[in-house]
Amino acid sequence: MSALRLLTLLSLTIFCGEFAIMFALDYLRIENEVVTNIVDATALIVIVFPALYFLVLKTILNKNADLTDAQRQLLAAKQELEQRIEERTNEIAVTNRELKETVARLNIRRAETARLSEMVNFFQACRDLDEALGLAQSQWQSMFPGLSGTFFLMKASHNLLEKKISWGRAFDLEPCHLPDECWALRRGKPHKTGGADGMASCRHLPSAEKSFRHICLPLSAHGEILGTLCLHIPETVEGRHDTGDRRNGDREAFYTAVAESLALAISNLRLRETLRYQAIRDPLTGLFNRRYLLETLDRELHRAAVRDQHLTMAMLDMDHFKRFNDTYGHAAGDAVLSRFGIILREWKRGEDIVARYGGEEFAIVLLDMSADKAFERLDSLRKIIETTAIEYYGQLLPPLTISGGISVYPLHAVNRDDLISIADAALYDAKRNGRNRISVALETSGLVHMVDKAQDIASSSAPTRAA
């Protein structure tokens, strides 16, 4: 009810009440003014008070009651809102904590990915498998703190795995084991043993180490099994990782990525080595080919010039090699070449360069060796060849002999082509003088003459036959 309406009703009530009192007093004819005033005031109170009660006070009381109900509702709403705010705050806190953990894991994963990428780049720059494995050993010690590990490489026969590198704690592991002794190789996926997993244990792992968990990771690339990476994880480290910055799944995924990177590196290095072998090696004899000889000879001549050393160039040719092909077939000739290659590989020093120059002609570079010493070594090789029995499918082939020519840097020439030409001329001089001998080119008065330094072995050699 509005205030104007209340004021109007109250005024009307007082007016009516006062009018009725005045009428009553006139009717009663009370002469005493004091009594009249008392009766007037009393009657006015009796009339106005109920009006005030019903018109004003009751309305106020009703409104107060309504306000009390509203306060209770507001209080309940406030409590409910505070509860919701508290729940939401807790949810936000949990979400914030999870986000921080996720960010921490992502930062660790980013750092590990960068470290893994750097390791892969190093693998790509490695020259051979031994260098790559040495790099992997040093990298893994820092990438897996607190962990130990062992890497087994599959041998070329694919029937045995050989322990190549290890780090951390030294476990009593066999140096070799069979492929079927590892569950990871048999199943083709990572295999965990130890701890509370209760999985079957690989036979090549230590069974007495109860305080360690072991993860075997198979290494394969392009469908070929290359080996296994075995990680040995102490339970203390495992528990720290579980409650710390990464989960088991993330960690095992990282281990797998590391194993895959090594597998690809091994596969690429083997492929690179195969291609390099095919590019510089003769497939029949296993010796270097002509291309490698020419490239290497330039380098060695420069090195000899810097060090002021001698370098001996020798050209060898098999005597009457055509008869092996004509009499016994080309397969027999290939067998003779293969056997000759084996003899040369066993005879040469580590720093010597031996190459098949073409057909039955071979070239040998003897580093830091004078003409006299080179003659002695090559003549000893000639005697070895002469006394070597060569069989072809159980049939003993005729004795093989060789002739050779020697030129020396810087005595005879200072460049590659001249050095080879002079040695080749000395070789043909040995052929003309009866074969089965070594000739050395000597420089006299600026002219190169071919002088036979071999002893006269014509009487002890087989009869001379046309090549």
Image (cartoon, grey):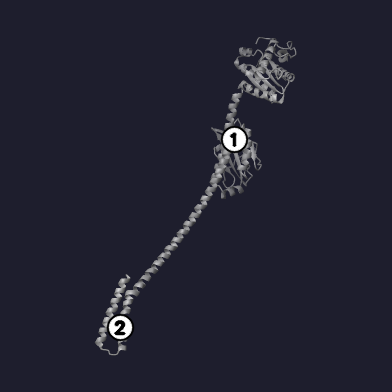
The image shows residue 228 at horizontal and vertical percentages of 59, 37
Label 1 sits on a secondary structure element that is helix
**Image position of 261 (left or right of 406):** left
Q: Are marks 1 and 2 in contact (CB under 8 Å)?
A: no
The residue closer to the viewer here, 349 or 313, is 313
Q: Please name the amino acid that badge 1 sits on.
A: Phe
Say which amino acid is labelled 2: Ala
Q: Nearer the viewer, residue 321 or 335?
A: 321
Q: Which quadrant is home to the N terminus?
A: bottom left
Please name the residue that numbered disc 2 is placed on.
Answer: 43
Horizontal and vertical percent position of residue 44: 31, 82
Q: Secondary structure at mark 2?
A: helix
Q: Residues within 10 Å of mark 1 (few under 14, many from 20)?
A: many
* Residue at 53%, 48% in the rendered image: 103
Q: Residue furthest left?
A: 27
Which corner quadrant of the image does residue 301 belong to? top right
Relative depth, front residue between 449 and 88:
449
Check residue 123 in the rendering and tell me which mark sits there, or answer none.
Answer: 1
In the drawing, what numbered circle is on residue 256? none
Q: Quadrant of the C terminus?
A: top right
How far is mark 1 from mark 2, CA to CA?
Answer: 115 Å
Judge by depth and name the residue closer to the eye, 400 or 313: 313
Query: Label 2: how many residues lie within 10 Å, few (<14), some (14-19) or many (20+)?
Result: some
Q: Which residue does the image show at 55% across and 46% down from the upper left?
A: 107
Query: Residue 342 in the image: x percent, y percent?
Result: 66, 22
From the viewer's perspective, tell me whether residue 295 is left or right of residue 450. Answer: left
Look at the image and tell me whether residue 20 can be seen: yes
Mark closer to the chain start, 1 or 2:
2
Label 1 vs label 2, nearer the camera: 2
Q: Residue furthest front?
A: 33
